[in-house]
């Protein structure tokens, strides 16, 4: 458990070499500013097998585990927070397909994502959220072998850019509680009746588009139902276990990247006739950052390893996500401080690392939600 | 509850400025953030209404108010949620060098414009290689007959593009003791050899025209030295108390503004439109943050009073600058943490405040410098 296998180490090296070779500071700056997905880098990453390494081999994947995907994600985010974040989000929520969808859907969609030919996005959230037991505003009704979808989703990751959306919607309006009447449906982005409204710039993660999706009598085949009807809520909770591990991996990578840059800068900067790195408070700050990164990495790997060994532990996934995100935010925050005025300048990157880390902290449930899940795992549901 | 002696005049002044902010500043902030600068005409409008250099006496063209007027401007400006018009920097940090140390000639020449908004000011200490270590600055000021010739560059200068005058700290290379070699020089926009149009790309403060300044054989008359030659370091030290206090006032006002907004959000919660009630954990966090905010406010008001009574509160203002800037950052981020990822949309102005706040633990002396000062005051 405490050492990666030889093949895992090779994956780490390959991902590191790829990111070092292909990621570029100026490219990251331009793409973040113009809010553009890194298409060329993404295609190369897919060519080398870095997308969907955890999908089954017969559906275009690498047939490996979530831990391998964690290792790749960590390396990409380590090299650049924004490019890493974007590539990690290329197949966003496609795990829902790998986990629950029919073989027909899997063999149709997953290879395209793994090969860098399609992006996927999750249409889960709604503006008029209300309390959980309320029915979702977005509904799908079966008519003549088609799902007819109406409603509005907000903050859809890859909204407007994705080829496929994984939609959470109400398929049974009468069942109580309402969350038992929700299902997941695969929606092709080019289906007539989908209107995309850009959500605009975010604090970070700006190479990944976010948009509101308005569905007006959108029709998709009945066979686009993912898994069983009425299981949407369960599926999403199960999916979030995996996605939180991936969030944690991104956070560990971003934190490590901030530490690297801090070491480089503080070794080169002299004030009061001493290198910044030679001040004791700097060295202690470095020690704290490195310790937190190591702790976050271990809990993230453990959560992935348990998952790959056929079990799930929701509370561990939430612990990993919360801890790693906090580690990343703190590490980047300290990095900015140790860079002084330069830390506040876009050119020196750590401010972007910070903004991207903050996105992870608030996504897939903020820290309060993670604590609710962890507490539920320890003391039972409230 | 305040120990400060606000008069009816102060209250009316606050109401007037609050209205001005709502009508003349806030509606333009998005535009200024996109353009990375505030038009100079806005500064002039501030000046025409008596909102600049409130402490400058009437005989020098100022409104002749007191420091409480400055406090009001600093506090209300924070609520516009942008840092483009850094009036407190101009009025309470830069201009006091002129009004305290400047010759009568300099005072009569520049103060009326500073108060009217015709003359926007900046101060330039930091250099690419000299940040916290101010004494290691390399900019040179060499005397040549009746002139001084300035060479070097300065960076992270607020109001750097808009400035009509800049006060620069530079060294006479013929004097080896760095503390005695530094003087302050007033340089006008348009002086040959002075370039200040290189705006810097930053995490936040996008409407603020922070710039890098370049001086190449920039020749100014000797009479543009502020005060006595060689007194630069002492002058800088003397003005730090007010600088740190002004930073602290802005930070605590920011804390109060963010908490008020967040509490109002939860108080007006409406499940029908997606806003939520504050659950117990949120309530406790808001209680913790409110406690911190109130305690800091009591400290800051005490310092304002002490400062106005000409007491030496330099250590206390260093403590305040450190503690309020940390609180501002942590409280904005905790409040942002209550929302999900959609809460980090730039449409949420708290996001802009978070980006703007981040520099406050760095500028006007980093918090590491503040801690060094505090430790030294303890005899360590």
Image: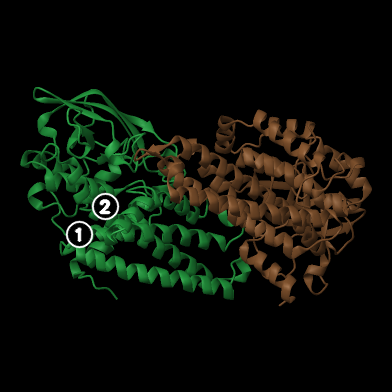
Chain colours: A brown, B green
Q: Is residue B372 above or below residue B149?
A: below
For the point 20% across and 62% down, the residue is B307
Q: Are marks 2 and 1 on the same chain?
A: yes
For the point 32% across and 47% down, the residue is B85
User: Is B344 on the left-hand or right-hand side of B142?
Assistant: right
Mark 2 residue crowding within 10 angstroms, few (<14) / some (14–19) / many (20+): many
- Badge nearest the viewer, 2 or 1: 2
Q: Is residue B156 above or below residue B380?
A: above
Label of residue B243 in the image: 2
User: Residue B26 versus residue A180: which sits nearer the camera?
Assistant: A180
Q: Are marks 2 and 1 in contact (CB under 8 Å)?
A: no
User: Residue B220 versus residue A272: which sits nearer the camera?
Assistant: A272
Residue position for label 1: B67
SS class, disc 1:
helix
Residue B173, image x, y percentages = 20, 28
- Letter of the chain that mark 2 sits on in the rendering: B
The tag earlier along the polypeptide, 2 or 1, is: 1
Q: Say which quadrant the N terminus of chain B sits in.
A: bottom left
Residue A74, image x, y percentages = 68, 44
User: Is A181 on the left-hand or right-hand side of A255?
Assistant: right
Q: Can residue A230 be seen in this view?
A: yes
Residue B303, image x, y percentages = 25, 65
């Amino acid at each position: 458990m405490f050492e990666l296998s030889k093949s895992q180490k090779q994956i780490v090296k390959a991902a590191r070499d790829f990111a070092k070779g292909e990621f570029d500071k100026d490219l990251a700056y331009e793409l973040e500013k113009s809010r553009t997905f890194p298409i060329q880098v993404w295609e190369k990453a897919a060519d080398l097998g870095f997308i969907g390494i955890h999908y089954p081999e017969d559906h275009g994947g690498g047939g490996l585990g979530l831990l391998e995907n964690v290792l790749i994600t960590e390396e990409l985010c380590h090299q650049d927070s924004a490019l890493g974040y974007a590539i990690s989000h290329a197949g966003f929520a496609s795990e829902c397909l790998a986990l629950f969808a029919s073989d027909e859907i899997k063999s149709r969609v997953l290879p395209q994502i793994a090969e860098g030919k399609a992006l996927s996005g999750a249409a889960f959230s709604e503006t008029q959220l209300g309390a959980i037991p309320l029915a979702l505003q977005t509904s799908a009704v079966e008519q003549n072998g088609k799902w007819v979808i109406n409603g509005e989703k907000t903050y859809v990751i890859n909204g407007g850019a994705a080829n496929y959306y994984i939609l959470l919607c109400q398929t049974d309006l009468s069942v109580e509680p309402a969350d038992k009447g929700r299902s997941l449906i695969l929606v092709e982005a080019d289906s007539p009746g989908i209107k995309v409204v850009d959500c605009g710039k975010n604090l970070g993660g700006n190479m990944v588009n976010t948009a509101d999706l308005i569905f007006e009598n959108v029709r998709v085949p009945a066979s686009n139902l993912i898994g069983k009807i009425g299981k949407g809520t369960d599926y999403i909770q199960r999916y979030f276990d995996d996605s939180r591990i991936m969030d944690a991996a991104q956070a560990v990578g971003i934190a490590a990247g901030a530490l690297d840059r801090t070491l480089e800068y503080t070794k080169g900067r002299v004030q009061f006739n001493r290198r910044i790195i030679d001040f004791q408070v700097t060295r202690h700050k470095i020690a704290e950052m490195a310790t937190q990164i190591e702790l976050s990495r271990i809990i993230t790997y453990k959560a992935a390893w348990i998952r790959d060994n056929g079990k799930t532990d929701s509370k561990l996934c939430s612990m990993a996500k919360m801890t790693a995100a906090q580690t990343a935010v703190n590490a980047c925050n300290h990095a900015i401080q140790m860079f002084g005025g330069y830390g506040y300048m876009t050119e020196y990157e750590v401010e972007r690392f910070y903004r991207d880390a903050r996105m992870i902290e608030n996504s897939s449930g903020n820290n309060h939600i993670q604590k609710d899940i962890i507490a539920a795992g320890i003391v039972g549901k409230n | 509850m305040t120990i400060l002696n606000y008069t009816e005049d102060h209250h009316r002044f606050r109401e007037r400025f609050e209205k001005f902010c709502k009508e003349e500043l806030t509606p333009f902030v998005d535009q200024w953030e996109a353009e990375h600068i505030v038009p100079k005409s806005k500064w002039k409008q501030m000046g025409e209404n008596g909102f600049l250099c409130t402490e400058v006496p009437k005989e020098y063209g100022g409104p002749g108010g007191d420091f409480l007027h400055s406090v009001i401007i600093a506090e209300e400006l924070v609520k516009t949620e942008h840092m483009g018009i850094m009036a407190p920097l101009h009025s309470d940090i830069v201009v006091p060098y002129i009004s305290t140390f400047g010759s009568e000639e300099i005072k009569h020449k520049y103060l009326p414009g500073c108060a009217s908004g015709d003359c926007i000011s900046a101060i330039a200490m930091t250099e690419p290689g000299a940040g916290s270590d101010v004494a290691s600055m390399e900019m040179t000021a060499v005397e040549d007959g009746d002139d001084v010739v300035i060479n070097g560059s300065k960076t992270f200068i607020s109001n750097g593009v808009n400035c009509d005058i800049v006060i620069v700290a530079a060294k006479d290379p013929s004097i080896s003791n760095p503390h005695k070699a530094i003087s302050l020089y007033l340089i006008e926009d348009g002086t040959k050899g002075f370039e200040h149009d290189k705006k810097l790309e930053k995490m936040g403060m996008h409407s603020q025209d922070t710039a890098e300044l370049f001086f190449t054989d920039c020749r100014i008359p000797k009479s543009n030295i502020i005060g006595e030659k060689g007194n630069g370091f002492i002058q800088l030290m003397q003005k730090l108390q007010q600088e740190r206090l002004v930073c602290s006032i802005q930070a605590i006002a920011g804390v109060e503004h963010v908490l008020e907004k967040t509490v109002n959000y939860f108080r007006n919660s409406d499940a029908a439109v997606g806003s939520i009630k504050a659950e117990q954990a949120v309530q406790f966090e808001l209680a913790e943050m409110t406690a911190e905010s109130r305690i800091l406010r009591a400290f800051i008001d005490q310092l304002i009073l002490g400062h106005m009574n000409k007491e030496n509160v330099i250590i206390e203002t260093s403590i305040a600058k450190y503690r309020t800037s940390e609180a501002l950052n942590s409280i904005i981020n905790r409040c942002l943490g209550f929302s999900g990822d959609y809460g980090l949309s730039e449409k949420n102005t708290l996001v802009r405040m978070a980006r703007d706040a981040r520099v406050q633990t760095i500028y006007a002396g980093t918090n590491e410098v503040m801690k060094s000062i505090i430790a030294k005051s303890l005899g360590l």
